[in-house]
Amino acid sequence: MNSVLLASNRGPVSFTVSDDGVLTMRRGGGGLVSGLSGVGKDLGVLWVCAALSDGDRGAVRQAPGGRLDHAGYDTGALRMLDIPAATFHRAYNAVANSTLWFVNHLLYDIPNTPSFGSRFHREWESYRDYNGAFALALAEEAAHEARVMVQDYHLTLTPAMLRAERPDLRIAHFSHTPWAPPEYFSLLPDEVAREVLEGILGADHAGFLTARWARAFMECCRSLLGAGVDEAAGTVTHEGRTTRVGVHALGVDGAALRERAGEPDVESHMAALREQVGDRRLIVRIDRTELSKNIVRGLLSYREFLAAHPEWHGRVVHLAFAYPSRHDLPEYREYTASVQRCAQEIEHEYATEDWDPLILNVDDDYPRSLAAYRLADVLLVNPIRDGMNLVAKEGPILSSRAALVLSREAGAAAELGEHALLVNPYDVCGTADALHRALVMPEDERASRREQLAAAATALPPQRWLADQLDALNYDQG
Ligand code: G6P
């Protein structure tokens, strides 16, 4: 029985299975996992996650009770849930990623999508089942009055389901995404919108990365549920229960990141990149190939910049790393193709025999990403909307001289905005201009901004985030 538990869809590791049946383990990706891996392990937290692939299912089936640590893997205490593949796909792809993610990042092409027919309602049933599987596993594993931290939009219903099962537990929910304003959130069918909000309100504490997202959640509770909201106190009261709403930014463990980025594999990627680009200035971006990351407009901005500033031709290279993500969704496959098309157009327009203006990589290579951070002169982070964005925080920690061009719609702008060059992510000309200003920024200004950015980025490391979440639950009890 465990006294502290953490639940998320993606776990800290994932497995691939080769043709001859051999399982290989690697670290999970994305903001949530990068932020929290390592922390939980130190504190003895039991992490409950879903099996995402055949490789994961293979590993779980060989592990007693789904406990990978009991099967000899070096994962920290980890239970992976073997949810039936069809249920998992409907919950993860159709509901979490195609619906809740789209709503909270304002990604719909409104004249055409969404359209909630009977198929959606079947998918919603699977989302319920999947959330129920987490609630059941947590109820089984949790000691009396244990603290349980449920993560993200995949698991909005779990807090209320778990509370029904185990009223003794202290439950937190945390959203790593933005939250939509009520007029956009209410695109969801009314009963679904209610269930999501009431699911989270099953927790004692609902956490968000910025005050803006917390406010949006409270506004949704007020206008869609008629809940009693005290914004100043950060409480939502609904059907006789009160949930506290808290803001907990997530930063980076600077020392651990620097140590990893000093390893020989990163150094050799740095040497290879230097060889490739010479002493040209580098504009770097690193993202999942994700609709909300706004990669196409980022490339269009670089193109505008090249058109407006011929004096930089031959003297600058844009390294754009866009590693694969959510390829089961057609929108993501199409988006990857648009990114590639746009990159080719820039190549055709500007490349010369001895100058490659843009290097686009669409495969995942963590040490190469760390090498790119270390070499960057400019870091471009221009999402349409983002819960936090850890790239904006990691870059200034590792680079010795990068200026940050940052979307004002990224949660990170709340902490970093003062020292970054803030842009409207839809304004391609404005972003092009910011790229230019970042390149010509005087050395002393660049150095002092970078220092301030790195200080802000490391102010709230994951250890602190986790401790604050746990403290918030102590307080709630009493
Ligand atoms: C965001 C979400 C995480 C998710 C990550 C990667 O950071 O907040 O919950 O794990 O994206 O997405 P994926 O679908 O690959 O898990």
Image (spheres, rainbow, N blue to C red):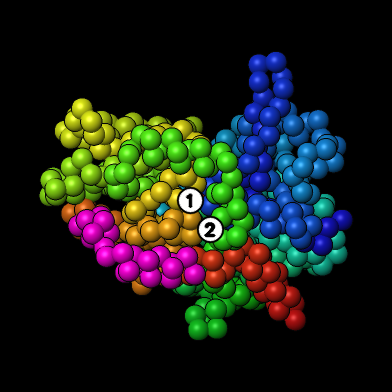
In the image, the segment drawn in magenta is 433-455
- Is ligand 1 less than 8 Å from the beta carbon at label 2? yes
Q: Residues within 10 Å of mark 1 (few under 14, many from 20)?
A: many
Q: Residues within 10 Å of mark 2 (few under 14, many from 20)?
A: many
Task: Name the residue rendered at 62%, 73% in the picture.
Answer: 243
Task: Name the residue rendered at 72%, 22% in the picture.
Answer: 22
Q: Position of residue 389 (x, y in %)?
A: 46, 57
- The residue indicated by pointer 2 is 176
> Disc number at residue 49?
none
Q: Position of residue 371 (x, y in %)?
A: 47, 45
Residue 215 visible: yes
Q: Main secondary structure of the magenta part?
A: helix
Q: Nearer the viewer, residue 375 or 30?
A: 375
Residue 296 counted in the magenta span:
no
Q: Secondary structure at mark 2?
A: loop
Q: Nearer the viewer, residue 262 or 384?
A: 262
- The residue indicated by pointer 1 is 100
Q: Quadrant of the C terminus?
A: bottom right
Residue type at mark 1 is Leu
Q: Which of pointers 1 and 2 indicates the residue nearer the eye? A: 2
In the picture shown, does residue 444 fall above or below 162?
below
Task: Name the residue rendered at 37%, 57% in the picture.
Answer: 402
The Cα–Cα distance between marks 1 and 2, rounded to whole angstroms, is: 12 Å
58 relative position to 107: left or right: right
